[in-house]
Amino acid sequence: MGTLPVSIEIPLPFCLRLHDDDYKVRLGERIYLCRLRKVWSDFASVCNPDKDESPKPEFLIQVKTGKITRASDTEIEFDKRGFFRHTVFSTTVYIDESSKPEEIKNRVIHAVLPLVNRFLKAYRYATGEFHVTEIQWPDLCMIRDGKIMPFLTMDYPVQPQHRQKIMGWFGGDENPLTTTKPNVAKEDHKAIEKVLLQENPSFPLERDLVLNARDYARQGRYGLAVFEIGTALEVAVNNLLLSKGMDEEELRYHTKFRDKYDSTLYKHAGVSLKDARPTLFSDVLKIWNIRNNVAHKRLTAYTDEKGSLIERIESKDRVEPLIRSTEQTLDFLNSLYP
């Protein structure tokens, strides 16, 4: 029985900081050729009907010296959800040629979702772009003119004048849009391409949880952000201790979380976080305290042993240091592997 090639384009709900190019992606026994191209989103057309349609725009930016200059090979930093620019993912998938017309849409979606999500996961892991998450059925809400068109969720500019500045217009204001972010360097491109061609790539769960936490913090969901990093800290230390030969039942049921980073870690890895990095150790215990309050009391706060309130964690400024401490702790644990 033969297969029917179906070419498809998916406008992603964010802009990937990758050069427009073809990328090879392994999925199962087949290697697919996938193309990325960045385009202006519909709102940009409304703001500026005369804008340049080039996929490589220039932005007016203000460098550290105070000089205003033009920058290319860069993208808008605050535009996390494709409000002004987004990436179009295109590829060809293969379905059973005996498929009935009414079955084609579902078969195409089943074929393309794992492919595009394989790409997005490799990109997210290699670049740390936490807002790039896997797309699901609700994102592929309709097929129009043979193309799957997702429902886009977007970050709106905080102030209306940013919409003017983002397009590189002065409008009488000498301060252009604040931040842009360079496209991914060639070395990172190579790292992503290497992952895309692996048969069974490994994405450490704890690193994924930290990226989730950053995304939750961006959304103002601070309790979920701390819950994710607390879970990441438990997953990472458990994996390390098991790799050092610790009995799983002893670890899971008879070892306190605090001890995993102190006496138990010293026993099995020859060093404890408490001794080596005391400040990090304190942060880890604080994160675990908040994580448990979120899980068991629906309270996003740091409390003492009696449950009295010490600090509410209700802003990005309170969460961001905890995320950084988690990343440093994961690096510390990773250094203890052979």
Image: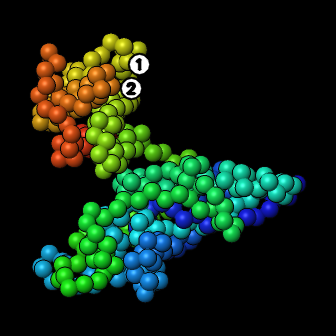
Q: How has the structure been colored for display?
A: rainbow
Residue, disc 2: 242
In which quarter of the view is residue 281 placed? top left
Position of 165 compared to 135: left or right? left
Residue drawn at the location 37% of the way across and 52% of the way down: 130
Q: Looking at the picture, does residue 186 appear above or below residue 236? A: below
Residue drawn at the location 53% of the way across and 52% of the way down: 135
Residue drawn at the location 74% of the way across and 59% of the way down: 94
Position of residue 238 measured from the top left corner of the image (x, y, whole percent): 35, 27
Alpha carbons under labels 1 and 2: distance apart: 7 Å
Q: Report the amino acid beneath label 2.
A: Leu
Query: Which comes before the other along the chain, label 1 or label 2?
Result: 2
Asked whether disc 1 touches disc 2, contact meaning CB atoms under 8 Å apart, the reply is yes
Position of 304 compared to 18: left or right? left
Position of residue 283 measured from the top left corner of the image (x, y, whole percent): 17, 34
Q: Report the amino acid beneath label 1.
A: Glu
Q: Looking at the picture, does residue 239 appear above or below residue 114? A: above
* Res 335 seen here: no
Report the number of numbered marks.
Answer: 2
Residue, disc 1: 248
In which quarter of the view is residue 127 placed? bottom left
Residue lying farthest top?
Answer: 254
Residue toward you, 107 or 145:
145
Element on which disc 1 rests: helix
Q: Quadrant of the N terminus?
A: bottom right
Residue toward you, 59 or 284:
59
Q: Looking at the picture, does residue 265 appear above or below residue 23? A: above
Position of residue 123 measured from the top left corner of the image (x, y, whole percent): 45, 58
Residue drawn at the location 78% of the way across and 52% of the way down: 103
Element on which disc 2 rests: helix
Q: Quadrant of the C terminus?
A: top left
* Res 256 seen here: yes
